Amino acid sequence: MTNDSAPPPPSPSAPGAGSATTAVVTTGTRIIGTYEIEKLINSGGMGEVYRGVNIHNGEPVAIKIVLASLAHDPKIVALFQKEATVLGRLAHEAIVRYHVFTNDPMIGRPCMVMEFVEGTAMSDRVEQGPMPVEDVRVLFRRVASGLDKAHRAGVVHRDLSPDNVILEGGAVEHAKLIDFGIAKSSSIGGGTLLQGQFAGKFNWVSPEQLGAFGGVVDGRSDIYSLALLIAAASRGKVVDMGASIVDAVGRRAAVPDLTGVNPSLMPLLSWMLQPDPGQRPDSMASVMAALDNAALIPAALVAPGGVDANRTVIGGSLPPFPLPGQPSQPPAAPQSTGGRRAPGELRLRRGSRAAVRR
């Protein structure tokens, strides 16, 4: 909400202004003397997003501003600055354009100015029901193409979900990716800004984001999340992948139930949703190629019946979660079974309770 009658923000020359003071953001507030706030359009746990306008050329913009309560938290400020850095490196029609990052002295908060995308969030479109398969394919290619550009630049999104895909003008052919705020550079060698803490939304993350398979997160993690997004678009309903970390780990022990997904998409999505990242497509380029040519999908996934729902092979350990009051124990060493399975692999039957071996 905005309050047009609120007092103007303090002058940067006022005592305590700048880095030590934050000001209320209202309609008419100007950022670096160029962008004027019009209205609040969204808010979250770390920041607020406003619609604004460039007063020099009339161009609408989106202005993301750190919450006043977090404006002096170095970790949060670094996260915002990281998003600006990531977006500044990416130029693609399916990725929201970045304009400028500043720690504005008038309001005493970090701000990021971006392209304003007028449209429908995929989360809202999913609630309207299944999308026609041709529209799903257009969306699929568009988002995969944007992510391919990001991955080639060494950036993993890590938070891909319907909330972070906007259909500009409601058109799938103009879908845009937003919120690279927890993106990780895979080419600079460092960890994420979250210092190894969980990042993303439980329902959409990959098994490795929950600690499985060594917790190594790369482009194949986005491949997993994209498959869940496309499945939701096709069936008009989100695939339930768990709302807590314990539930989410169990549900990722196998390829999820894709009932309601258009049959022509199921083999590729099943490939992308393999629990072991080593069994998924190796890149978004491979995903797009398989979208055009089903012959590139592993034969076992396109055979009658697709993936054997009663037999899932997992090539890595899942993170242990001890019950309350019980001490944690290290995972038991995997044992070979005479060559029938690779060491460390586990078979689960549908209907059985997923468990973490200790």
Image: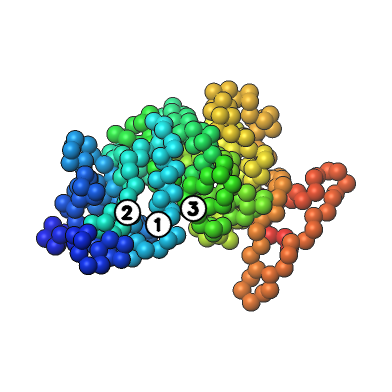
| Vertical comparison of 272 with 67: above or below | above
Q: Nearer the viewer, mark 3 or mark 2?
A: 2
Residue 146 vertical placement versus 218 (above, below): above
Crowd band around label 2 with a 10 angstrom C-alpha radius: few (<14), some (14–19), many (20+) = many
Callout 3–callout 2 Cβ contact below 8 Å:
no
Question: What label sits on residue 200 in the rendered view?
Answer: 3
Nearer-the-camera pick, 258 or 141: 141
Q: Secondary structure at mark 2?
A: strand
Question: Which residue is label 2 attached to?
Answer: 103
Marks 1 and 2, the one that precedes in the sequence: 1
Q: What residue type is disc 3 on?
A: Gly
**Contact, mark 1 vs mark 2 (Cβ under 8 Å):** yes
Q: Earlier in the sequence, mark 3 or mark 1?
A: 1
Q: Furthest residue to the left?
A: 5
Q: Amino acid at mark 2?
A: Asn
Could you tell me residue 160's position as x and y percent? Answer: 47, 45
Q: Secondary structure at mark 1?
A: helix
Disc 3 to disc 1: CB gap under 8 Å: no
Q: Nearer the viewer, residue 190 or 39?
A: 190
Numbered-mark total: 3
Residue at 19 percent of width and 56 percent of height = 26
Q: Circle 1 sits on which residue?
A: 77
- Quadrant assignment, res 131: top left
What sort of colour scheme is used for the picture? rainbow
**Left or right of 164 on screen, residue 257:** right
| Picture residue at 40% right of the left edge, 39% below the top | 88
SS assignment at label 3: loop
Q: Quadrant of the N terminus?
A: bottom left
Mark 1 and mark 2: Cα distance apart in space? 9 Å
Residues at marks 3 and 1, CA–CA distance in whole angstroms: 18 Å
